[in-house]
Image (cartoon, grey):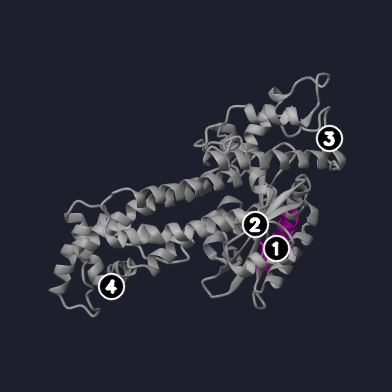
């Protein structure tokens, strides 16, 4: 090496491994394991050790036990400290809770928190995922949610409301044991109504035949190969068929869409498969009338699917947006049912069932929120004028919202949170600067509310940002 450096001017520095911190490398490996949900024994594999020996020859890879007992535990503690600090910066928050069953048939209860910090930045935190060890009564669920909040130091007074599905035990936990406003998760509303209509109306026979076709061309290797060959010959995209699962949102629509898109390939494949010897019984194809009903059902279900997808794609899904979207869906279904679309009776039955069930859930959605629904809708710049309601209902809800806002302002003035610094007017942390008149002229909350009400409503269709961005831009 000395000879090469002196006589041939070879620079070996560029071939040397850069200095590294073994502790930092260990930490980064632990991050990879945690974020990608990899088993700890990955670090014991020969291939992994060879890779690190090539990258950092002097590095000694810790054992899986070291990662599980010390390294990842330290990472968890670091992350908890960061989350606890962020949670402390959020004066008020909402919770969401749901049940979940793993692939191994173990049940869990999830609790998450959502809120805006004082800079109007939206945060969501997964507080806890607890295994279900007892009967899932309302009391048990409430106890699980309360423990999750206590673990993170979230006082009961900071919780505005709780979002869950429509299960009786969830509603009981929130209203009777936690004594908080209960909000119906809109995604559950849509998917539950659609699932019940698909399975409990005359469309159920078509759904069963569609499910049988999908399952046949998915699970049987021979028919599956024939089906893919036919898709290719017909110039169709080679896509496997989907199965409808009641707990998988939108799966019914996906199955029907995939079937309709491959209708020609299904017809030819069934003919070819019947000429072959297959162990499974070959299902019957749908009749022309049933295919027409599938096409009509897709036409009806697609707007509903788009509605809850729109909300899920927003940076912040507000109560106001959920209120408006559910009202839009009911109005659209009502128009479809009233108009002369020439739908078959089976499709009309499906529409009526969805509308009736959505109407009941809409009443449930509005009936447990008290003033909060009107107040939240009013404070969302995209829904502040209740444009989606009829004239009488719009005026009534707007009056309720303004009255609720006055009560909130009075409460804030009398009992300001310690961490919030207020300016001259009691509403200046709530309403944008351009709505204020000078304090010398008036500091009346009524005038400030009226000026906010008269501001132009933001476009409801805007997906780029939530209302918190608008408030952050207009704060004073």
Q: Could you tell me which residue is drawn at 58 percent across and 27 percent down?
A: 456
Q: Could you tell me which residue is drawn at 74 percent across and 61 percent down?
A: 179
| Chain-order first, disc 3 or disc 4 | 4
Q: Residues within 10 Å of mark 1 (few under 14, many from 20)?
A: some
Return the mark for residue 421.
3
Main SS of the magenta segment? helix
Boundaries of the magenta span = 62-79
Question: Foreground residue, 73 or 101?
Answer: 101
**Circles 2, 3 touching at the beta carbon (< 8 Å):** no
Viewer-side label of 4, 2: 2
Quarter of the image with the C terminus in it = top right
Mark 1 secondary-structure assignment: helix
Q: What percent of the width, then of the height, locates residue 239?
A: 30, 57
| Chain-order first, disc 1 or disc 2 | 1
Q: Residues within 10 Å of mark 2 (few under 14, many from 20)?
A: some
Q: Residues within 10 Å of mark 3 (few under 14, many from 20)?
A: few
Q: Which residue is under mark 4?
A: 220
Q: Which residue is under mark 2?
A: 368
Mark 4 secondary-structure assignment: loop
């Amino acid at each position: 090496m000395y000879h090469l450096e002196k006589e041939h001017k070879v620079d070996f520095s560029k071939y040397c491994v850069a200095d590294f911190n073994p502790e930092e490398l260990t930490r980064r490996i632990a991050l990879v394991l945690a974020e990608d949900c990899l088993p700890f024994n990955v670090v014991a594999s020969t291939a992994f050790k060879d890779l690190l020996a090539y990258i950092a020859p002097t590095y000694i890879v810790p054992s899986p036990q070291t990662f599980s007992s010390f390294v990842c535990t330290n990472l968890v503690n670091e992350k908890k400290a960061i989350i606890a600090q962020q949670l402390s910066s959020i004066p008020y928050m909402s919770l969401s809770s749901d049940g979940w069953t793993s692939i191994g048939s173990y049940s869990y209860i999830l609790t998450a928190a959502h809120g805006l910090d004082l800079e109007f930045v939206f945060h969501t935190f997964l507080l806890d995922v607890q295994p279900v060890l007892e009967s899932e009564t309302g009391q048990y669920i409430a106890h699980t949610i309360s423990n999750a909040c206590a673990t993170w130091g979230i006082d009961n007074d900071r919780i505005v409301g709780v979002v869950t599905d429509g299960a009786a035990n969830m509603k009981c936990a929130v209203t009777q044991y936690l004594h908080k406003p209960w909000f119906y998760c809109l995604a559950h509303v849509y998917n539950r109504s659609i699932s019940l209509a698909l399975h409990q109306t005359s469309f159920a026979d078509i759904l069963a035949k569609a499910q049988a076709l999908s399952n046949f061309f998915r699970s049987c290797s021979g028919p599956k190969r024939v089906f893919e060959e036919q898709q290719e010959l017909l110039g169709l995209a080679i896509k496997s068929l989907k199965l409808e699962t009641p707990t998988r949102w939108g799966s019914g629509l996906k199955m029907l869409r995939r079937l309709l898109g491959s209708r020609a390939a299904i017809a030819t494949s069934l003919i070819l498969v019947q000429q072959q010897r297959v162990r499974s019984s070959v299902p019957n194809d749908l009749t022309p009338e049933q295919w027409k009903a599938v096409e009509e059902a897709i036409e009806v279900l697609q707007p509903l699917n788009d509605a809850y997808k729109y909300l899920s794609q927003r940076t912040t899904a507000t109560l106001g947006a959920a209120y408006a979207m559910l009202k839009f869906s009911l109005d659209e279904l009502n128009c479809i049912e009233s108009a002369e679309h020439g739908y078959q009776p089976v499709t009309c039955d499906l529409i009526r069932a969805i509308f009736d069930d959505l109407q009941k859930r809409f009443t449930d959605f509005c009936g447990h929120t008290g003033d909060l629904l009107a107040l939240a809708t009013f404070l969302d710049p995209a829904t502040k004028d209740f444009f989606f309601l009829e004239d009488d209902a719009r005026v009534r809800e707007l009056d309720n919202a303004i009255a609720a806002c006055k009560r909130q302002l009075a409460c804030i003035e009398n009992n300001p949170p310690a961490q919030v610094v207020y300016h001259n007017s009691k509403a200046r942390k709530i309403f944008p600067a351009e709505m204020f008149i000078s304090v010398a002229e008036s500091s009346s909350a009524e005038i400030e509310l009226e000026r906010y009400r008269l501001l132009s409503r933001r476009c409801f269709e805007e997906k780029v940002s939530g209302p918190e961005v608008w408030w952050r831009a207009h704060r004073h």
